[in-house]
Amino acid sequence: LKRILEVGVNEHGLMYDAVNPQTGEVTKPRIADNWGYNLNGFYTVALTDWLIGHSDKDRTGPILQVFHNLGHYKNFDWENGSQDGYADAIEGGLNLYNRIRDSTVRDWLDSEIKVMWSMQDSSHRKDTEQWRNSGIIEGWHGDGNFARTTLMYCLWKTQGTYMRPWRKDLLWGATREGDTLNIVIESQEAWTGKLYFDQPRHKTFLNLPADYPRINQFPEWFVADLKQSYRLQSIDGKIDHQYTGLELIDGVPLELAAGQMSQLLLSKANL
């Protein structure tokens, strides 16, 4: 990692596509769209240090350097005009922002996702008549990266919550303030269903001791603790229920009237 920082990054801390680690020669000078995923290695080493008690070592400096220089990379051509480069750049930044909440990278993510989404219009496609209104972006398997990045971004904006049954007129988002989750839900037509909450998937699915950053993962945002009890309230006072963490994961029932906006607060309750 030290050698990478010596010969493999530019003045802003972003990595080149390829260098010769022995000579230090930059063999492919294009800036790597996978900068965030590459920096996973630095964060994993930092996480390892913290887990074994080496709290005096902070290896997050290279990550913060990149974060603070992202303003130079707005509307940047990551991969010769391909949306795939944007998808990878945003994913890597989002994955690290999940661990290090920095306002600079937050604003960059909100800005650059709009650039990526704009690539789904007809002007970006090879054959506009064939693909018009099809949803296809470039017509190769890399279009899946566009979809995955969009899902990752939306799961950030909903803090890992999801709703069933889904409809186009159903809108929701969530933000976290300390241990409190703020959720806003709106539906144009009457809706009945369930609101689901995420769980610590690195433990429950993968049996990992820590949620280390890894390529293509869906980061965990708000996760329900199976050993915790929670209180769900609505701002208007019509909802005030207590749920276990397991009940949140299994989904809590909700009803929305047509045009209704529901504002909910989820906080920890005494067991």
Image (tube, rainbow, N blue to C red):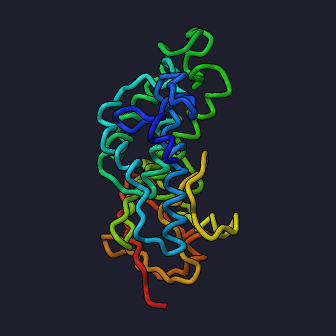
**Residue 221 picture location, percent across and down:** 48, 60
Most foreground residue, 140 or 210: 210
Most foreground residue, 246 or 187: 246
Residue for point 47% across, 34% down = 7
Q: Is 75 above or below relative to 211?
A: above
Q: Is residue 114 left or right of residue 80?
A: left
Q: Is residue 239 left or right of residue 219?
A: left
Most foreground residue, 190 or 196: 196
Q: Is residue 113 visible?
A: no
Residue for point 51% across, 25% down = 25
**Residue 97 picture location, percent across and down:** 42, 52
Name the image quarter holding residue 136: top right
Q: Is 42 above or below relative to 68?
A: below
Q: Is residue 29 visible?
A: yes
Q: Is residue 135 left or right of residue 158?
A: right
Q: How many numbered badges does the structure rendering display?
A: 0
Residue for point 56% across, 34% down = 21
Q: Is 126 above or below relative to 192?
A: above
| Residue that sits furthest to the bottom in the current view | 271
Most foreground residue, 42 or 92: 42
**Residue 173 picture location, percent across and down:** 41, 54
Q: Is residue 96 left or right of residue 200?
A: left
Residue for point 57% across, 26% down = 135
Q: Is 92 above or below relative to 261?
A: above
**Residue 120 picture location, percent across and down:** 50, 24
